[in-house]
Amino acid sequence: MNEHEERGNTMTGVDPDRLDDQQLMKELETIHRTRHDTLLYGSNDALRAHNERMAQLEGEFLRRNPSRPVAAGRTREGARERGSGESTTPTTPGT
């Protein structure tokens, strides 16, 4: 098959594991930017395709970045403490 995977007549894009890191991030930024409009105004088929593509891209990102920084405020415990003024931005140790 060529660089685009096809399901029936629906083109789903380049297989995420074939994207380099920069392309993967660009695809993730685009799909997250279009999410709201797809949810509100897209057909059921469009939303289903969006869900599948987002899951593929996010899954590939997580596979490549198993030790990605996690902000303390984005955990359950951190959410309980969020009122104390802690940042939700991850910090790099030693900075």
Image (tube, rainbow, N blue to C red):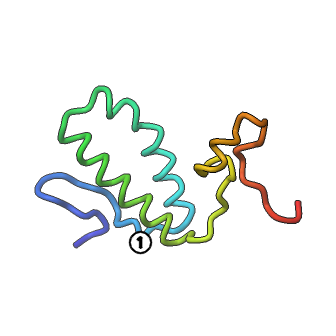
| Residue lying farthest to the top in this orientation | 41
Q: Is residue 67 left or right of residue 54?
A: right
Give the quadrant of residue 70: bottom right
Which residue corresponds to the image point at 28% horizontal and 63% vertical from the top-left? 4
Residue 74: percent from the left, percent from the top? 62, 48
Residue 48: percent from the left, percent from the top? 23, 45
Which residue corresponds to the image point at 70% horizontal and 39% vertical from the top-left? 82
Q: Is 46 placed above or below 26 here? A: above
Which residue corresponds to the image point at 28% horizontal and 26% vertical from the top-left? 41
Which residue corresponds to the image point at 49% horizontal and 60% vertical from the top-left? 24
Q: Is 40 placed above or below 1 here? A: above
Which secondary structure lies at badge 1?
helix
Nearest the camera: 56 or 4?
56
- Where is mark 1, residue-wise? 18
Q: Is residue 14 left or right of residue 48?
A: right
Q: Is residue 72 left or right of residue 9?
A: right
Nearest the camera: 38 or 88?
88
Residue 66: percent from the left, percent from the top? 56, 71
Nearest the camera: 50 or 74?
74
Q: Quadrant of the N terminus?
A: bottom left
Q: Amino acid at mark 1?
A: Arg
Residue 28: percent from the left, percent from the top? 48, 52
